[in-house]
Image: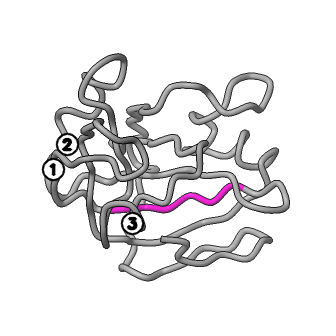
Amino acid sequence: MAVLFNNCRCRDHAGLYGAGAFFDLNLVGGQADMATDLRPGDECVVAAPVEGGDVEFNWYAFTHERVMDTPDEPSTQVRVQSGTWLRSERLLKPAAATTAPYSAFFDVNGHFKRRSVIKRGWGGEARRAEPGAAVDRGRKAGPGH
C-alpha cells in the first residue's frame, strides 16, 4: 500500500522545512486525522502540477514526521512528513488521470481531487526502485524534489 499526497498547491516542502520534507498537514481541522499511521519505509507518492499541463509524481520512502512552524503561515504549526526520495515520473495530466496508481488523484472529469491524502492498496502493482531512478513515459522526468 502507498499513501498518495496531493500537492496541487505546488508547495516547496523541502524549501520550507529542509531536505527530505515532502508534505505538510495541518494539526487541526480536516487534515488532522490524515496520514497518522505512516511507518518508516512506507511508500508515499506526491503529485504536483508542473508547466505544460504535466503532473509530476515523486515517490518517497517515509522516514519520519515532526511538528514544525509554517514559515509562510505565521502562528500555524503543521506535521511535516519527510523521507528518502526514490524516483519521479512525469505524465501529461490526461494520461495521469487514467494511469494506475495515479488515477486515484483525479475525479471522473480528470481534475485533481480536493482531498490532501489518499490511501491506496494496489497489491502486486506496487513497485520498488533504487533512489534516484527516474521514469519517463514520453515526457521529461527528473527529481523535482
Is residue 92 within the magenta segment?
no
SS at badge 2:
loop
Binning the other alpha carbons within 10 Å of mark 2 as few (below 14), some (14 to 19) or many (20 upward) gives some
Read off the residue under disc 3.
14
Q: Mark 2 is on which residue type?
A: Leu
**Front-lying residue, 23 or 62:** 23
The residue shown at (67%, 33%) is: 112
Measure how far apart labels 2 and 3 are at the Cα level: 19 Å
Read off the residue under disc 2.
38
In this image, 76 relative to 6: left or right? left
The residue shown at (43%, 82%) is: 132
Q: Which residues are magenta?
A: 55-60
SS at badge 1:
strand
Q: Is residue 15 above or below residue 23?
A: below
Q: Which quadrant holds the N terminus?
A: top left
Q: Mark 1 is on which residue type?
A: Arg
Numbered mark located on residue 11 in the image: none
The residue shown at (58%, 25%) is: 114
Read off the residue under disc 1.
66
Binning the other alpha carbons within 10 Å of mark 3 as few (below 14), some (14 to 19) or many (20 upward) gives some
Report x, y in % for residue 18.
30, 69
Measure how far apart labels 1 and 3 are at the Cα level: 13 Å
